[in-house]
Image (spheres, helix red, strand yellow):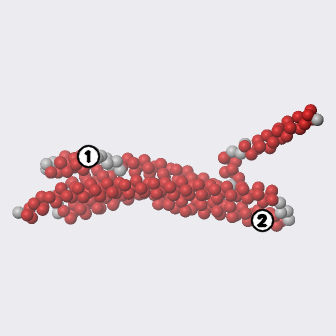
Amino acid sequence: MILLQVPTTGTSAVDSTAAAAPAQSMQLFDLVAKGGWVMIPISILFFLTLYLIIERWLFIRSNTRVDDNFIDNVKDMVMQGNIKSAESFCKNQRNSIGRIFEKAVGRIGSPIKDIEGTLETVGQIELSRLERNLGYLGIIAGIAPMLGFIGTISGIIRIFYDISLSDNISVGIIAGGLYEKMITSGAGLIVGVIAYTGYHLLNMLIEKFTLKLEINSFEFMEVLQKPTEAARVR
């Protein structure tokens, strides 16, 4: 009895291993291919999302770096009357805040309102440059999941259409076709989440820079207004 049972156990183990092998050999590319034609635009949106996030992150990081002593150096030069030096110092920063204050320093001598207007106008231009193409991430975050649902719904319609023609309501047929069509929903949601997350993280970097810009602008205008206030007292 023992001898008869050993081969049976061995055969069972081999069969279970053989049955498990096809499931383990499923590759990512195979899953994508089973999703159908909808996976093509979803894949394009995926690579576009990665490109936009990386490109915008590098651009924003390089243009929003603010030296802790930047505004203090500018204020010292302005108070000493070295306007040209302050302007050159801002220009050499080669970032958004440097370009903003370069224009503002160049307007010193004009009325305070004009300098404030220059800070606001150039600041808005620089913020627009930082936010460029971010809207596409917001669009992708909305479109990608919908494309995934379209692929799933069209696949389900096809499955039930085939069942109506064959008159064969088999759980295997329904489950096999359904899991393939659900791939598009999963892929669309993943792309949407990546785009949504990237959009808001990049906006957080811009908001952080905006706060620094407002603080530095306030300190800069405070220095310019001191001589005016002193003149009024006299």
Q: Is residue 190 shown above or below 156? A: above
Name the residue carrying label 2. 160
The answer to whether residue 96 shows anywhere in this view is: yes
**Quarter-of-image position of residue 23:** top right
Name the residue carrying label 1. 69
The one of 227 and 133 positioned closer to us in this rendering: 227
Q: Position of residue 2 (x, y in %)?
A: 91, 34
Q: Is residue 189 left or right of residue 21?
A: left
Q: Residue at x 83, y 65 (%)?
A: 165
The answer to whether residue 45 shows anywhere in this view is: no
Q: Is residue 30 shown above or below 156? A: above
Specify the quadrant that holds the C terminus. bottom left
Residue that lies at the very extreme toward the top in this rendered image: 3
Q: Position of residue 64 (x, y in %)?
A: 35, 50
**Quarter-of-image position of residue 175:** bottom right
Question: Is there a contact, CB below 8 Å, between mark 2 and mark 1?
Answer: no
Secondary structure of residue under mark 1: loop
Sequence-wise, the earlier of marks 2 and 1 is 1
- For the residues marked 2 and 1, what is the alpha-carbon distance in whole angstroms? 68 Å
Residue that lies at the very extreme toward the left in this rendered image: 234
The one of 145 and 33 positioned closer to us in this rendering: 145
Q: Report the amino acid beneath label 1.
A: Asn
